[in-house]
Image (cartoon, rainbow, N blue to C red):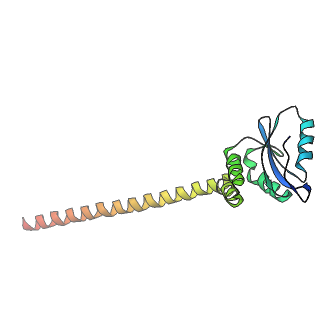
């Protein structure tokens, strides 16, 4: 089992991402080595550490909330691109970008963006339709004037 970084000789509190079978467990531990040993005794599946980030229970709960759309059960999640990207950004040391990515790609945010895009397209269509109507109204008006001028000459 890999050694985990410690702070002042004691294990550092972390939020961890481990793959157990086909699911990803996101949890919090003040002593990751001990927690991994406990997990190993409770499952026959292979446990693979994907990542750890400095954190607390609040960070763990925020992740659970942000990823609730792919939650399998409790602290277990279905493999998902959002988790992979979060881990990748966090491993590069850019936790702010990782959190922003989760926020920007949340199902609620994507739905909100889709609604905004739809509204924008409707407004654009209305604008285009109004321009088209004005163009044809101008053509009809010009044609009426031409016909009226022709009738006056005859």
Along the horizontal axis of the image, is 63 left or right of 137? Answer: right
Please provide percent x and percent y for residue 144.
20, 64
Q: Is residue 20 above or below residue 74?
A: above
Furthest residue to the front? 9
Query: In the picture, residue 7 is in which quadrant?
Result: bottom right
Please provide percent x and percent y for residue 22.
77, 35
Furthest residue to the left? 154
Q: Is residue 123 above or below residue 43?
A: below
Taking the spot 74% from the left edge, 50% from the top edge, the residue there is 67
Taking the spot 78% from the left edge, 39% from the top edge, the residue there is 23
Q: Quadrant of the C terminus?
A: bottom left
Q: As rendered, which of 123 and 86 lies closer to the eye? A: 86
Along the horizontal axis of the image, is 113 left or right of 55? Answer: left
Along the horizontal axis of the image, is 119 left or right of 64? Answer: left
Q: As rendered, which of 141 and 24 lies closer to the eye? A: 24
Q: Quadrant of the N terminus?
A: top right
Q: Is residue 1 above or below residue 100?
A: above
Query: In the picture, residue 30 is in which quadrant?
Result: bottom right
Please provide percent x and percent y for residue 111.
62, 53
Furthest residue to the top? 44
Taking the spot 30% from the left edge, 62% from the top edge, the residue there is 135
Give the total number of marks visible in the rendering. 0
Please provide percent x and percent y for residue 12.
87, 56
Query: In the picture, residue 70 is in which quadrant?
Result: top right
Q: As rendered, which of 89 and 105 lies closer to the eye? A: 89
């Amino acid at each position: 089992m890999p050694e985990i970084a410690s702070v002042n000789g004691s294990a550092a509190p972390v939020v961890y991402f481990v793959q157990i079978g086909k699911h990803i467990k996101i949890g919090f531990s003040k002593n990751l080595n001990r927690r991994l040993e406990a997990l190993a005794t409770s499952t026959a599946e292979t446990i693979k550490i994907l990542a750890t980030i400095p954190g607390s229970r609040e960070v763990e709960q925020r992740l659970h909330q942000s990823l609730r759309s792919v939650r399998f059960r409790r602290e277990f999640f279905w493999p998902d691109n959002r988790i992979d990207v979060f881990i990748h950004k966090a491993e590069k040391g850019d936790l702010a970008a990782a959190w922003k990515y989760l926020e920007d790609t949340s199902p609620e945010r994507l739905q909100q963006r889709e609604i905004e895009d739809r509204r924008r397209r409707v407004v654009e269509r209305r604008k285009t339709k109004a321009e088209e109507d004005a163009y044809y109204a101008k053509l009809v008006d010009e044609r009426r004037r031409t016909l009226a001028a022709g009738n006056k000459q005859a």
